[in-house]
Amino acid sequence: MSQVHTSANGHPVPEATLLMICLHGSAARGLGPINAAQILLFSPDPPEAGTPLKSAPDFRHIPAIPGPATTEAEALRFNMPGLASLGEPTAALRELLPGLKITGRVPVHRLGPQDLAPLLPAQGNIAVAMDCPGAEAGVLDALWRCIGPDRITRITLRCGAQAFFHGASGRTGVAQMLQAQGFGRTGSDTSDPDWPVLSFQPDPKVRQIADLQVKLNDLSQTVADLTAAQTRSDAREAQLVAQVQSLQAAKDAVDQAFASFRTETEAARQSLATQQTAAAEAIRKRDQCLADQALSARVQAMQALDLRDLRTQLDHSERERQRQEDLLRKLTPRLAQAAAHLQALQIGQTNAPGQPQSGKGIAKPKPGKLPKPAKDPKHRKAKAGPAL
């Protein structure tokens, strides 16, 4: 951390570089004595005649104003000498200066940290003198980002007692801003109470407090993160407990459903076994019935065959009887004639030849009985076979 460099008699040692940042060329006159080997003037206007700026061994004028980003802006000029700003006036300024008017608008080039850094010295202590009402915060932020607060040994600035321009912080806001970077106020010029000139230098105690405050903020953030993590952990634990309970309930439901399913399965198995037994019995009965039907069919077929044979034999016997009757009808007259002729012959032999005797005493042949049909040796009664 940089310390304030002083000589043996207590006077400040000249800084290597002085940065003067002004919106108006005449503003540099009221920022205190100039004691630096190098002077960099950031202003849209060149220095006015009579200012001792050019007497420095190394002087450069840069027509721009540092800012948060490189861009184009405009500075407002007012009817009050030496007053300029990058922001519009507020109601507080118009109340302070009832006759305030804008007299001109001057283009201003803003340099962001990336473009500002190459223009600043890479080494050595730096003093800052600034008169940029309404732009203090943006200018200081650009310096912090380029060179950091440790290389700055002195800051002198003129600002409004209040926020007289849009974007301005006022005296209190500027002091708080610098205090946050470890600077303590070492003096103030209140000859114009509405536009005091404030001086700041690095304060080890302030910076130590600021460092402690940063550490405290870091610790607070860590505690907040740990608390948030613990809260998330507790929430996650509660969520896991709820999930475990839900899973246990689901497991119990599954176990109950499985037990019920097992009972139903056992009942279904027993019912199936009963149905299989009944089906087997039904199949056995069906097979027995089919066997009985097959046997009955065979018996009926045999009976039908025997009946057909009997009918055939009966038809044959009937035809034979009919034939014999026809033959008998045909033979009966002949037999009668033969018998008569034979009788006549017998009578003629007894009485006289050639004279047939009367029919008395001649026996007539009796028709013989028809022979019974012969039995068919193949004919037999059908016997029922053993049951299948």
Image (cartoon, helix red, strand yellow):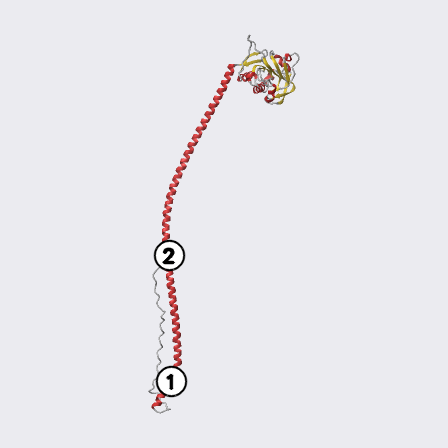
Tag shown at residue 287: 2
Find residue 325 and report its horizontal and vertical position in percent. Answer: 39, 78
Q: Most extreme residue toward the front, as rendered?
A: 123
Specify whether 73 is left or right of 285.
right
Find residue 240 and report its horizontal and vertical position in percent. Answer: 43, 32
The crowding category of the residue bearing disc 1, from other C-alpha atoms within 10 Å (few below 14, some 14 to 19, many at least 20), is some
Specify whether 223 is left or right of 281.
right
Specify whether 346 is left or right of 55.
left
Find residue 384 and report its horizontal and vertical position in percent. Answer: 34, 63
Find residue 165 and report its horizontal and vertical position in percent. Answer: 59, 19
Secondary-structure class at tag 2: helix
> What type is the residue that disc 1 sits on?
Ala
Tag shown at residue 338: 1
Q: Most extreme residue toward the bottom, as rendered?
A: 352
The answer to which quarter of the image holds residue 89 is top right
Q: CA distance from mark 2 to mark 1?
A: 73 Å
Tag shown at residue 292: none
Q: Is residue 357 visible?
A: no
Q: Identify the residue at horizontal 38%, vertical 42% (top origin).
A: 260
Q: Is residue 247 visible?
A: yes
Q: Quadrant of the C terminus?
A: bottom left
Earlier-in-chain disc, 2 versus 1? 2
Q: Identify the residue at horizontal 40%, vertical 79% (top origin).
A: 327
